[in-house]
Image: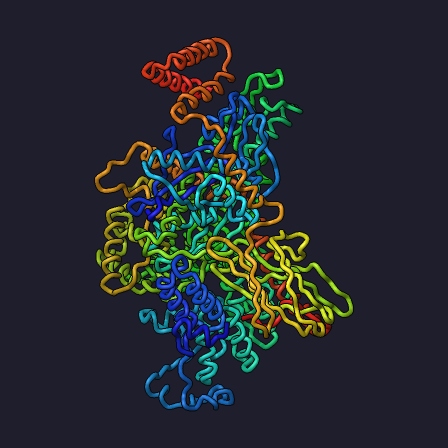
Amino acid sequence: MRTEEGITVGIDLGTTNSLVAILRNGRPVVLENSVGNLLTPSAVSVDEDGNILVGGPARDRATTHPERTVERFKRDMGTDKRFSLGKKRYRPEELSAILLRELVEAAEATLGEKIKEAVVTVPAYFGDLQRQATRDAAKIAGLKVERIINEPTAAALAYGLHERERELQAVILDLGGGTFDITVLEIVDGVVEIQSSAGDARLGGEDFSDALLKWVEDAEGLKDLNAVDRARLRVACDRAKRQLGDQEQARIAVFDIDGRDIERTITRANTALIYQELLGRMRLPILRALRDAELQVDDIDEVLLVGGATRMREVSELVTKLFNRLPLRSLPPDEAVAMGAAIQAALKIDDDQVSDMVVTDVAPFTVGVSSAAVVGTREVSGLFSPILERGTCIPASRVERFFTMVDNQKKILIEVFQGEHSTCKENTKLGEYTMKVPPKRAGDVAVDVRISYDLNGIIEVEMNIAGSSRKEHLIIERNPGQMSETQVKKAREAMEKLKFHPRESLPNRTALSRAEAVYQELRGEERLIFGALLADFRGALETQDDNLIQTLRDALNNATQQFSVRR
Amino acid sequence: MKISDALATLGLESGATSRDARKAYLRLIKVHKPETDPEGFAKVREAYDTLKKRLPRNAVPEPGPLSGAGLETPVNTPPAFEGSRQENPVPNLSPMDLSPEVPTDPRDFSKREIDVSEPELGPSERALDGAELEFGSAKPMPVQFSREIELAWERVSDAQYPMGTRKELKQAIETHPEHFEFRSELFEIELETGRKNKAIDIAIEGLRNGHEEFVVDLIEFAPSEVTEEQVERAFEQDPLRVALAWIRSNDQRKRGIDVLENASRSLKTEFDCDRLVFTILNAMVHRSSRRLRDIGKVTVEFRKQIARPRAGDALLINTFAEELFALEVPLSEETCRVFAGAILNGGDAIIRTSLPKNVRKALKAQAPMLRQLVIERFEAPAPSPGSDASSGPSMHWGWILFIVVSCSFRAFRACDRHERNQSRQIDTQGLIELRRELEQYRQSQGVPEETYFRDPVGESPLDEPALDEPRNPREQALVDEMEATFERDRATQESLSNEADRGALDDLAEEFRDEEEQDQARQRAIERTSRQVLEILERNRVNVPGTVDRR
């Protein structure tokens, strides 16, 4: 996967966790990060000295210092929301950039080589705004990212690479931390053809944890918890949710929330009700994807589950019932998307390892222009005229013809929108262009508007007056509400100046933050013992004696694991 | 894109089918890959998209020398062209025979039995005592058709493009309203594609045109549309079919089961037994009930008493039926339909079921071979009349065929579970051998590999560690986790197959199905409405943006 400039990798930038993968010997391999894990939590935190922490150490601080930690910022990509970390405020693009930088540097350390380019995944339901934001994040991080692919497509690639000898019709359901995506694909003759995709951008494993949290809060009559208590309770709910994947019941037990000790047992019978609304929301995207692909449930040969949240038994049961078959889990649920990104990276540079595979993807949303119509004597404006429909195989280019509305009209305003609603008001504006037209009678001037959507998701608009050779171009790059070029440049420079926590002490940092989180939850004797060990370690850090530090760190990590499992 | 341009882009001639277009597309995109040649790819894809829906599915044969005379040819005269009579003397040119893919259903059961496939059944066995088990008398088959209708019929028999075939069928119905087969086929298509109301309309119209065959369908789907006399007449002709319709409509379920029970008491011949068992199995597809199972058992018992020991379908069905009836777990719809169709109809025409498309295709391709294989197996250790068939491997062949025919891992597990319940060792060795034999046979026939035989569980990327490397602990942990997950899923499936376990999820799944149906109804309504809207716009039109000129 080498070009002249350096290595190309695939990056799964997830809501909860992120991964980096590369194609090696024909198989996708996920790379370890600096603490030896495959998954890097998508969290950013700032410590008291103003150093930036990313990943595990940051995630641990979510409970201890929630006001200096941000998680799940992917959901706000494409918006103007600002997050405060300590004294500074950051946009979601900047946080993603910080995360990207950390991922890339850790991967480079593992590989021993420079990474020049990456393919990054986004949920299929990300609109153009959010994709541009992701591109900006990469720019800010100094990483070349030309190709953005949909997460379910990536999962399809990981599945397709393995199954490309077969001929089948499959559905991939990806329930990750924050989003739910479904892709319908057909594999035939070594060609992986994505036929349709749909999803819910705000439905993920985290929502299930939130639902549990709400249930506990309601059941215990807890109102207006402070941030720390809430965070701790949520961690416990999260843990219980995971335990229910294996067991029939789980305990949610947290000390000293709002002055009380909370202890609740939750069973599968409880969750069936608690999750019902969320599970119900999964239906609509499935119906839409099947309809777009012009297929029915009975036409599907295989259903594949991907994404950590599919470990929940309720989800797999629902899927089994909806599709009348047992879903497959032949891909590691957390790694499938990253693996697919690695395959796409190889495909993009025409690597030999994937020379026998061809992949086709579809446009994730409809692109069109605003138009008006005259019905009888009334004029209706603000209508949305689709030109390139969602589900069109890309790269694609489609054209529609429009007419002037008024006699001697001098200009025509072409506003480009993305979305599925019938009125432009409810869709997302991508850009506009004003074009001069020769004055003639209404309806005598025709303008052909051609929309092209390439593999990189760049939308190009070409306008041409029918009968004349004049063509106007518009490449949709910057959307209103997005960062401008200058802003991106400034943010990039600011990134360079950010203080990241020194890499060498990352294992120490991780050990400390994890231990701190556990320490908070302990009481009595246990707390004393553990506290002593913690203090020992801090002392060792002062001595700068590497051997001592290592020994005590191992001991601390062991103890951390013991004490947190016991709960 | 114009069709001529599209054809040129794909390098096709004007008589090409959509299948040819697909093949050309798949071939060309390996040359014009989207990554390396985006413009070339876009062009190829657009050509393919344009042709996908516009080209016919199957090749349209060259029209014969007198094709123009087709439509006026009265139905019962021999065809106008010599060639067909001399070279292809087809004695019974019924539409069903023109295409082997046409499904059979109970309605056609009578025709099939009369056909040549089972020469051993002597006339005495077909002549039934008592009016009860008399066959339904279908209208006499029209002997010849005009060329146009033949061609239309060929295109009709493949239901992959219902819109196209629907048009053909509708035309055929208009020009030849007396032919029951066209209506029947259209009825099937509408039913299969979920347009139940349309199907009912066709049945009602058919009935009005004198096709009493539709009475039974209407009993099942719209009982209010048939009169008591019609029901009685249909019942006289074929009580089992009517009983099945009652059971399936859930309307008069008990009455239907009563009829079956009576029939089981008045069995006379093997043939009656087989037919009754088939009906029961078809009924069990909807909801398995103890009563039905008991009736089935009784029938099979009786069948064994009067049976001559003989290999072939009749014995097969009894072996199967016995196994099935002994199972406590209600069987899935597909399983019942599959084996019932496969066995009873010699495997040549399998009832259109909810099997995945590729399995169906593969089964159809291999059914004759499968049947042969099973017959051989059954003939090999000649079972003596009174022998206890539970000893020796022959008993397991029923199971093995069951697995092979239903081609599912789930079936394997169901057998496994059943075998364990009976504390018998499953003949896995035999199973492995059979698979191997099938592979060899398939290869020797040059049939392309259908990979549905693969066990989905064992085929994960993690199951193939590189040759020299032992699996590292992380991978091992992951494999362990996945196996644990599979075990959990298996437990889930077991709990799901227990009907009593209805929970919130069942409601969701049902709602989903309803929504799917509603969705389709909505789609049809939308299609209708948008057509109306366009008409209105056309009439009022001054400027309609975005119309015309779809390049």
The image quadrant where one finds the C terminus of chain B is: bottom right
Q: Residue A219 location in percent, x, y?
A: 63, 26
Q: Residue B279 location in percent, x, y?
A: 46, 60
Q: Nearer the viewer, residue B495 or A14?
A: A14
Say how many tags the image has: 0
Locate residue B259 relative to residue A107 in the image: left or right. Answer: right
Locate residue B462 relative to residue B244 in the image: left or right. Answer: left
Q: Residue A377 location in percent, x, y?
A: 78, 69
Q: Residue B103 location in percent, x, y?
A: 43, 67
Q: Quadrant of residue B15?
A: bottom left
Q: Quadrant of residue A564?
A: top left
What residue appears at the point 36 percent right and 16 percent down from the top-left corner? Answer: A549
Q: Nearer the viewer, residue B290 or A493?
A: A493
What residue appears at the point 42 percent right and 50 percent down from the top-left corner? Answer: A156
Locate residue A195 relative to residue A270 in the image: left or right. Answer: left
Q: Nearer the viewer, residue B116 or A54?
A: A54
In the picture shown, does residue A279 fall above or below A468? above
